[in-house]
Image: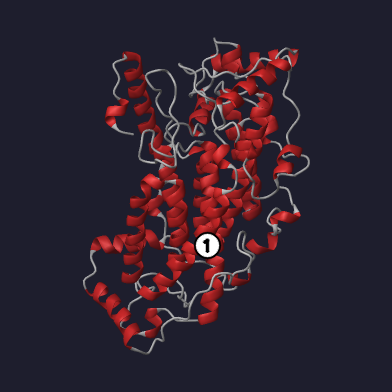
């Protein structure tokens, strides 16, 4: 967003931008993982050397893409690669050691953090034009105003999912070829090479770090194109860190990058055909949503922003899910919320007002902790941050990290799809629209109320994380309930929005299994034990 585009002669607009900037700065403090520097170097409890036998998500098989045989370790070309490591280790600096330890915490972890940071950076709605209309970010012109993307909750849920799925499939393919070629790590081949990270005695061709990075580069290039230079710079830092640590040689990296890019392109092809391109909708479609609600004798949702902003991604509910098909999205749509003309609706509206007028300190803490609004990594990112903390403690291998994040983020994307389908099917008004005296504690999202996005995202996340870490299942359920309640306490949602959003869908029990999912709609408990 360029400065000249933000300048305005209207005092109220300038004030809004100033206040928005302050909110963003405050929110971004939470969007970054303040503990990330304290994460220990990854030393997995299990190497998962058999991961080449695991089922990929998008690939037909682990060996779908060919990786050529590596250089022999006894010969001049490989000796040159070993000498590169020795030269780096001879004059290693404190900053290089810092980078080694930073990336040593886990490549999947660090790229997930990077994604969260970019989501927070780009989670900013465009400012209106002089004529009161709103510009829409365009992938075809990512550096124009407004820069692409606007990484709102549904966009971010999809971004986390594609990143994690691509990384998981890349690591499954990597494990297959590492076992096939069984080329040892440089510190095992040459005693003069020091291992500056924990030695796990696993093959290194192709490099795990590289396949993850190759997949990441292809996904980021499409989802965050204006930030690809930053992502490439981090990839370069990672390469230097792993070389200096004696963990890989350059040809390990190059083979891994090529494989990872191939897998990333496969994921990008799916993303290009998943119907996201139509998620914004058209003015005619927006008008039809309002007309349909009126035809049902209901009060339709309207944007309370001044000037009115178009609804956020009203067709996101038509995006292709990962864990079931689009017909299932419709099949598990919950029943209608209480009619805006019913006594139950009036009771729920009065309840929202009572919280808005008498919120306690503890309730307010919940509201702000789970707000995840402008300038943050959004509710899906919040659950990724929670997962990261617990996965670090569990000491998962890189491939298990990727598998678990793929499960989490596919569920979050699909939760967002079902939630947005429900929101725009019923087009239910927010409490402060029905009673302007209700003042929200933290902002007001620009989309309909029923069901609560926070509740739906949180219910899905708690289910998946409880499966992955059964000892933490009760804690995850409690977190999800608190996240859901926070939207009621903050005056943003009615009780029915929260309770229905949090509850499992009867036909899906949280996730649907369908033959087309290749088994990924059903969890396999044994894999994490």
* 261 sits left or right of 319 in the view: left
Residue 232, given in percent of the width and then of the height, sits at 35, 56
Q: Residue at x 57, y 31 (%)?
A: 281
**Residue, far right:** 507
Residue at 74%, 39% in the rendered image:
505
Q: Residue furthest bottom?
A: 74
Please determine whether, in this image, residue 211 is positioned above or below residue 119: below
Q: Residue at x 41, y 33 (%)?
A: 27
Query: Within the image, what quadrant is residue 74 found in?
Result: bottom left
In the rendered image, which quarter contains the N terminus? Answer: top left
The percent position of residue 190, horizontal first and vertical second, equals 35, 85
In this figure, what is the number of numbered marks? 1
Q: Is residue 280 above or below residue 247?
A: above
Residue 401 makes an appearance in the image:
no
Query: Residue 324, image x and y in percent?
Result: 70, 48
Pick the front one: 521 or 468: 521
- Residue situated in front as seen by the camera: 35 or 345: 345
- Determine whether the residue tagged by mark 1 lies in a helix, strand or loop: helix
- Image side of residue 277 versus residue 194, left or right: right
Residue situated in front as seen by the camera: 479 or 323: 323
Percent x, y of residue 171 = 53, 65
Crowd around label 1: few <14 · some 14–19 · many ≥20 (10 Å): many
Residue located beneath label 1 in the image: 263
């Amino acid at each position: 967003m360029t400065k000249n585009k933000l300048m305005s002669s209207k005092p109220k607009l300038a004030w809004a931008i100033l206040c928005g900037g302050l909110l963003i700065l405050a929110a971004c403090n939470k969007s970054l993982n303040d503990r990330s520097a304290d994460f220990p170097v990854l030393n997995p409890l299990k190497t998962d050397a058999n991961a080449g036998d695991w089922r990929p998500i998008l690939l037909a098989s682990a060996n779908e893409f060919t990786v050529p045989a590596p250089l022999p370790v006894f010969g001049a070309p490989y000796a040159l690669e070993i000498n590169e490591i020795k030269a780096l280790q001879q004059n290693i600096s404190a900053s290089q050691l810092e980078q080694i330890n930073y990336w040593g915490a886990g490549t999947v972890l660090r790229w997930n953090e990077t994604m969260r940071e970019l989501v927070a950076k780009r989670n900013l709605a465009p400012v209106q034009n002089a004529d009161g209309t709103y510009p829409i970010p365009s992938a075809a012109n990512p550096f124009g105003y407004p820069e692409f993307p606007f990484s709102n909750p549904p966009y971010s849920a999809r971004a986390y999912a594609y990143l994690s799925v691509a990384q998981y499939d890349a690591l499954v393919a990597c494990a297959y070829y590492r076992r096939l070629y069984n080329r040892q790590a440089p510190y095992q081949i040459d005693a003069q090479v020091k291992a500056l990270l924990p030695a796990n005695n696993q093959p290194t061709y192709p490099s795990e770090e590289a396949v993850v990075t190759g997949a990441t580069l292809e996904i980021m290039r499409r989802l965050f194109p204006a930030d690809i230079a930053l992502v490439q710079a981090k990839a370069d830092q990672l390469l230097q860190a792993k070389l200096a640590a004696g963990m890989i040689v350059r040809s390990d990296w190059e083979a891994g990058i090529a494989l990872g890019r191939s897998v990333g392109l496969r994921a990008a092809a799916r993303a290009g055909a998943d119907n996201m391109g139509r998620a914004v909708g058209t003015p005619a479609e927006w008008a039809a949503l309002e007309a349909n609600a009126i035809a049902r004798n209901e009060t339709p949702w309207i944007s309370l922003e001044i000037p009115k902003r178009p609804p956020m991604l009203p067709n996101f509910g038509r995006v292709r899910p990962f864990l079931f098909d689009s017909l299932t999205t419709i099949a598990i749509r919950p029943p209608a919320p209480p009619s805006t003309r019913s006594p139950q609706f009036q009771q729920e509206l009065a309840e929202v007002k009572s919280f808005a007028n008498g919120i306690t300190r503890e309730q307010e803490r919940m509201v702000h902790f789970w707000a995840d609004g402008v300038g943050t990594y959004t509710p899906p990112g919040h659950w990724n941050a929670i997962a990261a903390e617990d996965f670090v403690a569990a000491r998962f291998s890189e491939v298990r990290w990727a598998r678990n994040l793929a499960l989490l983020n596919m569920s979050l994307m699909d939760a967002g799809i079902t939630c947005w389908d429900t929101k725009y099917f019923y087009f239910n008004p927010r409490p402060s629209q029905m009673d302007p005296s209700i003042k929200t504690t933290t902002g007001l999202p620009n989309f309909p109320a029923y069901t609560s996005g926070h509740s739906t995202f949180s219910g899905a996340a708690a289910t998946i994380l409880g499966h992955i870490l059964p000892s933490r299942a009760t804690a995850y359920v409690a977190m999800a309930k608190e996240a859901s309640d926070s939207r009621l306490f903050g005056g943003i949602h009615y009780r029915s929005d929260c309770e229905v959003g949090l509850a499992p869908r009867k036909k899906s029990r949280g996730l649907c299994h369908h033959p087309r999912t290749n088994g990924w709609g059903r969890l396999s408990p044994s894999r994490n034990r």
